Amino acid sequence: MQLSEFPLTALMEITSRPPLVFMRGEGSWIWDHEGRKYLDYVQGWAVNCLGHSPRAVVDALARQAATLVNPSPAFWNAPSAKLAKLLVDHSAFDRVFFANTGAEANEGAIKLARKWGAKHRGGAYEIATFEHAFHGRTLATMSASDRAGWDKLFEPKVPGFPKARLNDLESVRRAVNERTVAVMLEPIQGESGVLPATDAFLVELRAFTRDRGLLLILDEVQTGVGRTGKLFAYEHAGIEPDIMTLGKGIGGGVPLAALLAREAACCFDHGDQGGTYNGNPLMTAVGCAVMEAVLAPGFLGGVTERGQYLAEALRRLSARRGLGEVRGRGLLLALDLGSEIGGRVVDAARQGGLLLNSPRPHTLRFMPALTVSAAEIDAMLASLDDAIAAVRG
Ligand code: PLP
């Protein structure tokens, strides 16, 4: 098909997109409107954890669509209960509220913390968040985030999100006062270029928040559900947060997110939280299929192994081409390019049949399917090498 055959101008303009319409995907591969094939290291923005259209997701959708799509959130349904049980059985949390997007799950975490502050901390409502954080695009989650250009956008801001510096406990101490109810962070700041909180910092932060009677909220929208080689990234540090949010990977590509909390933090009264689509059986049936795949013996070990394989290969490429550091964990990695050529490398890679992401002008981010093969890692590196060579002339 020709690009002109698609009525693209009927869509609201919100970002610049390359002149491609994607039509079909399978595993690590995706095909455009001209039938051209690409190796996909974006994967729906780190959401297709089992790759494009995996059998488990297709079957769960088909089975559930033919059975029950939405009885309304005013009634129980079986897949949501099953998925909640799978999540609490494999995490530090006691209860789950399902949402549709990561931002909505984070909005729910903010509401839960504020409610807890109102009930147990004399009305404390501030949540210390971090420089370079990304928590979503609702008004509250934008205020909790710290993105260049967002400080003057959609004023007035939602108040109550003082910023600390990642891996700097002193800065957290400074951001906390008698109005503070929680500290909220991503274990790895993905959108800001894969900037990890160290395990030592997470341990310190857990001890600090416990001492001060504050909730610790982890935004695992990007890091959760196997992305870093553990089911949840907080496990690497051996800590247990009070609240966690999930999105992206939990749905394997469909809109599903979750807010998880320990019993002591579960303080919503009836009517405080809800939503027409929240916990619908169609999406939560997919979540069950994803969790069963990720929990299967050997799956997480495979993510760790291929993550190390990818990281080592990127380090060799970096050394050979004189680039910068490789950061991240599991299959959420970044390569520092040493100069602001990220956008041009992404364009050149796409022309060579590889989809990549550059979250910052000097950084490439790699977020393949967790099922990516070693051969698909080798193929990506060959294309990336060509793209870097083309950009550098
Ligand atoms: N939190 C983190 C850490 C994210 O990476 C993202 C999305 O990139 C979000 C929240 C927002 O998720 P969503 O786009 O599903 O609202």
Image (cartoon, rainbow, N blue to C red):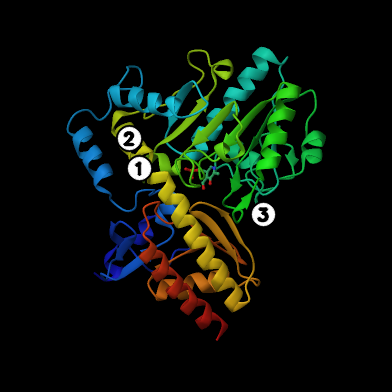
Q: Is residue 1 left or right of residue 158?
A: left
| Circles 1 and 2: CB atoms closer than 8 Å | yes
**Mark 1, secondary structure of its residue:** loop
Q: Tell me the kind of residue under disc 2.
A: Met
Q: Nearer the viewer, mark 3 or mark 2?
A: 2
Q: Tell me the kind of residue under disc 1.
A: Val
Q: Quadrant of the C terminus?
A: bottom right
Picture quadrant of residue 265: top right
Residue at (55%, 43%) from the top-left corner? 136
Measuring from the top left, give residue 288's x and y in whole percent.
33, 33
Q: Nearer the viewer, mark 1 or mark 3?
A: 1
Residue at (30%, 29%) from the top-left corner? 281
The Cα–Cα distance between marks 3 and 2, rounded to whole angstroms, is: 33 Å
**Mark 3, secondary structure of its residue:** loop
Which labelled disc corresponds to residue 283? Answer: 2
The Cα–Cα distance between marks 1 and 2, rounded to whole angstroms, is: 7 Å
